[in-house]
Image (spheres, rainbow, N blue to C red):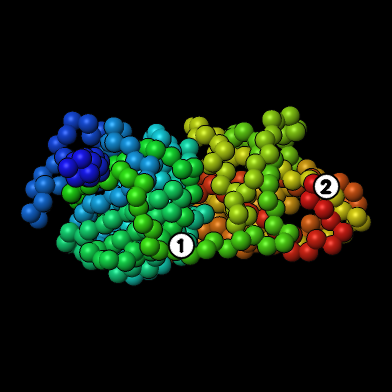
């Protein structure tokens, strides 16, 4: 009898960790331009337009999140927030319903210091081409174990795809999010448990190749306007307090991870010292989001903008080693400075020297 009682006790404890979250619970915190609790297509649901609906009292580290969403084929971004530390830092998974069937129909991205990162985190390691059904309730399940997450879309037994989470493993709050066209949410269920089986395998990220810059010295943020109408670095750039920070294993530096959002302060310096065994011109590959100024030994050599839709209506501004500048290095020490400015969608940079002949990154 004792063994049976112990089994039942453990079972009850496990079940008590599963929570069906009532949408009328006063613990919901809404920050949105439009939301309502109403009956929609047979379900008690939350209608959400621009904004978020949050539960800070529900903490999830490992476990299962299940919910239903109802959306149209109009532009919207319905999804879920989890591992939330505060309004500026969390993980998110969301849809782009109007892009159903395209490679970016879905999106996983971390949010650091108020900056989303979809321009940095794109491709099969973070998104999936999924045919999304419209004007009906669709079931979603996220299975989270440490740094891995299986994403189930629809009533399926196998994950639609899997991702490796970017943010530090954390026990945080959760909630719903959306923008633009209304979306509906229902049947949010949370199971907090370490007993999670991850079935899928994330598509591996592309590792950095030889010559890729793996760390930078980064300045505090400042106003981009300080660099306008000048072809040289401001005299005070060297007096900034720089911090050495590593890139991700892909070589991408997510600047937002190290810089807090401040009004108007949308630019940082990334500094790199390079030693050259002789005077020579070398190729320098780089990518950025959203705007960049490249300086060599204090002199401006290059400016460009990759802002979303800045070139045509389909231009995404995603980051990659898409640009090459030929740097006239002098013999000895050289200083490369990237001034990187952000609008939205991802604040980052990546750089690589295709040839390391007679040069050394300090």
Name the residue at 52% across, 54% down. 120
Name the residue at 24% across, 63% down. 154
Task: Identify which residue, 17 or 127, lies in the foreground.
Answer: 17
Label 1 sits on residue: 202
Q: Position of residue 232 (x, y in %)?
A: 75, 42
Query: Is mark 1 in CB contact (under 8 Å) with mark 2?
Result: no
Q: Quadrant of residue 225?
A: top right
In the rendered picture of this protein, how many numbered marks are placed on residues?
2
Classify mark 1: helix, strand or loop.
loop
Label 2 sits on residue: 334
Q: Position of residue 308 (x, y in %)?
A: 47, 55
Q: Is residue 237 left or right of residue 308?
A: right
Q: Position of residue 23 (x, y in %)?
A: 17, 40
Tag on residue 345?
Answer: none
Q: Position of residue 66 (x, y in %)?
A: 25, 52
Name the residue at 80% across, 61% down. 356
Q: Is residue 252 left or right of residue 6?
A: right
- Say few, some or many: other residues with alpha carbon within 10 Å of mark 1 (under 14 / 14 to 19 / 20 or more): some
| Image vertical order of residue 298 relative to residue 67, above or below | above
Q: Label 1 vs label 2: CA separation?
A: 40 Å
- Say few, some or many: other residues with alpha carbon within 10 Å of mark 2 (under 14 / 14 to 19 / 20 or more): some
Task: Identify which residue, 241 or 202, lies in the foreground.
Answer: 202
The answer to whether residue 244 of the structure is visible from this angle is: yes
Name the residue at 33% across, 37% down. 59
Task: Identify which residue, 245 or 3, lies in the foreground.
Answer: 3
Q: Is residue 349 left or right of residue 61?
A: right
Q: Quadrant of the N terminus?
A: top left
| Image vertical order of residue 124 relative to residue 173, above or below | below
Camera-near label (1 vs 2) is 1
Classify mark 2: helix, strand or loop.
strand
């Amino acid at each position: 009898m004792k063994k049976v009682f112990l089994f039942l006790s453990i079972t009850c404890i496990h079940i008590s960790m599963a929570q069906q979250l009532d949408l009328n619970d006063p613990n919901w915190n809404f920050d949105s331009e439009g939301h309502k609790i109403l009956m929609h297509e047979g379900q008690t649901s939350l209608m959400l337009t621009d904004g978020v609906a949050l539960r800070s009292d529900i903490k999830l580290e490992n476990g299962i999140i299940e919910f239903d969403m109802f959306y149209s084929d109009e532009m919207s971004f319905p999804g879920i927030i989890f591992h939330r530390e505060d309004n500026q830092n969390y993980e998110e998974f969301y849809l782009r319903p109007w892009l159903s069937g395209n490679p970016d129909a879905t999106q996983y991205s971390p949010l650091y210091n108020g900056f989303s990162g979809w321009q940095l985190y794109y491709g099969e390691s973070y998104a999936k081409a999924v045919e999304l059904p419209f004007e009906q309730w669709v079931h979603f399940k996220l299975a989270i174990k440490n740094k891995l997450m299986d994403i189930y879309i629809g009533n399926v037994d196998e994950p639609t795809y899997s991702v490796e989470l970017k943010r530090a493993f954390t026990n945080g709050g959760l909630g719903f999010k959306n923008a633009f066209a209304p979306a509906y949410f229902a049947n949010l269920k949370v199971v907090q448990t370490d007993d999670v089986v991850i079935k899928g395998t994330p598509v591996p990220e592309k590792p950095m190749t030889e010559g890729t810059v793996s760390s930078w010295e980064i300045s505090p943020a400042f106003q981009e306007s300080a660099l306008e109408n000048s072809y040289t670095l401001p005299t005070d750039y060297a007096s900034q307090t720089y911090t050495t920070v590593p890139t991700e294993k892909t070589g991408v530096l997510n600047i937002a991870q190290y810089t807090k959002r401040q009004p108007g302060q949308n630019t940082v310096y990334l500094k790199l010292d390079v030693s050259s065994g002789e005077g020579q011109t070398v190729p320098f590959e780089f990518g950025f989001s959203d705007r960049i100024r490249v300086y060599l030994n204090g002199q401006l050599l290059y400016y460009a903008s990759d802002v979303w839709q800045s070139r045509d209506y389909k231009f995404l501004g995603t980051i990659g080693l898409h640009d090459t500048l030929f740097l006239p290095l002098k013999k000895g020490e050289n200083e490369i400075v990237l001034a990187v400015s952000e609008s939205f969608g991802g604040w980052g940079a990546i750089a690589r020297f295709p040839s390391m002949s007679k040069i050394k990154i300090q």
